[in-house]
Amino acid sequence: HPRRHERRAGATDDAGAAALSAVATLPDFSLTNLAGEQQSIRSWPGKPLLINFWATWCGPCLREIPMLKELQAARPDVQVVGIAIDKPDLVTKFAADMQFNYAILIGQNEAWAAAGALGVNIFALPFTVFTAGDGSVLGVHTGELHAEHLETFRDTVDALAAGRIDVAEARRRIADAI
């Protein structure tokens, strides 16, 4: 039986909590970027990643974008990657208007497959995967991001990079915040 993908905008944390399965490290997958080229999710070695799955039709997703742009501008040591689960022509037009300052990858079924490879088994938009600079997956948040989520991510990757905490503690901090 093919897995049924539930696609809902604005899932709440309770109803749409994403489960992180046995995926401890970032799997390698490639999706099309805005230039129409395949780009690997591992294109930013050594950088913590905030991987945000979104769509042009998803209201909560669109509310997150200004905050993600601010994070990318303030923290060039962290890479925000937006993965649009949407039609490429819609994303390209939207991106031209939005003037993203972070990487955008595009896919439809391929993007859902990437989510599955990351261990996300509940499909509701938006959802976000947080990784450490070494590719360790730190956590998954389903639903709209808020400033406190980004603050916890920044503080956690800073403490991890400085050697003040280990990956297990980083995962605990992210889990407590999301």
Image (spheres, grey):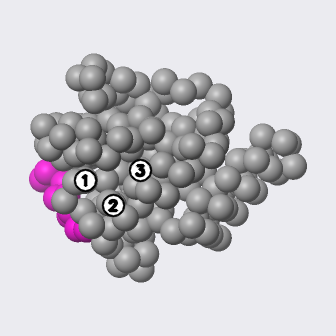
**Does 7 appear in magenta?**
yes
> Which residue was labeled with disc 1?
55
Q: Eyeballing the image, is 169 above or below 118?
A: below
Q: Eyeballing the image, is 136 above or below 56?
A: above
Query: Do the residues bearing badges 2 and 3 touch, measured as CB atoms within 8 Å?
Result: yes
Left or right placement of residue 91 versus residue 130 in this view: left
Residue 120 percent coordinates (x, y): 39, 54
> Which residue was labeled with disc 3?
52
Q: Secondary structure at mark 3?
A: strand
Q: Amino acid at mark 2?
A: Cys
Q: Indicate which label's residue lies in the foreground, 2 or 3.
A: 2
Residue 30 percent coordinates (x, y): 34, 27
Residue at far right of view: 164
Q: Is residue 25 visible?
A: no
Query: Do the residues bearing badges 1 and 2 touch, measured as CB atoms within 8 Å?
Result: yes
Image quadrant assignment for residue 58:
bottom left
